[in-house]
Amino acid sequence: MLLDGPPIGNVGRHVWDRYPPVVLDTSAAMELGYRPVGDYAATVADQVDWLVEAASGGEEAERLPSEHDPFFAALFDYDAEDRLQARE
């Protein structure tokens, strides 16, 4: 479910949620000759595969964030998400 607008409380937030947003400027690297090995679609596939495997209880599942970790706890408020969806 997509939200129309900014996060509502912690629902819709993520660990990279910042204002102003974090922007990576690679223009200096490009001027020095850096060339990316691929675009987003080509380079993200391995990470998505790893996440799906870990989230399915794979070998590295313990490396995923947990609702018991104080840094991530607010991002795992599934009851708040359910309440928001019930209003829709």
Image: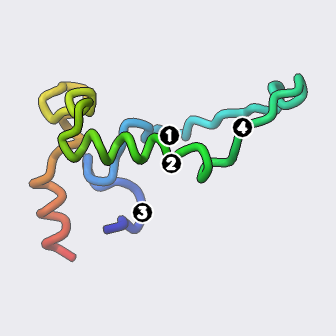
In which quadrant of the rendered view does residue 82 lie? bottom left
Question: Which secondary structure lies at badge 2?
Answer: helix
Residue that badge 4 annotates: 37
User: Badge 3, how many Cα within 10 Å: few under 14, some, many 20+?
Assistant: few
In which quadrant of the rendered view does residue 27 lie? top right
Give the amino acid at mark 2. Answer: Ala
Residue that badge 1 annotates: 19
Instruction: Tell me, yes or no, whether the two marked residues, 3 and 4, touch with CB atoms within 8 Å.
Output: no
Disc with the residue nearer the chain's start (2 vs 3) = 3
Kindly identify the residue that appears in the image at 22 percent across and 38 percent down.
58
Residue 3 in picture, x, y percent from top left? 36, 65
Question: Which secondary structure lies at badge 1?
Answer: loop
* Residue nearest the viewer, comparing 34 with 46: 46
How far, Cα to Cα, is label 2 from label 3? 28 Å
Give the amino acid at mark 1. Answer: Tyr
User: Badge 1, how many Cα within 10 Å: few under 14, some, many 20+?
Assistant: few
Tell me if I can see residue 65 in this picture: no
How far, Cα to Cα, is label 3 from label 4? 34 Å
Question: Which secondary structure lies at badge 3?
Answer: loop
Q: Residue furthest bottom?
A: 88
How far, Cα to Cα, is label 2 from label 1? 28 Å
Whether 63 is drawn above or below 17: the answer is above
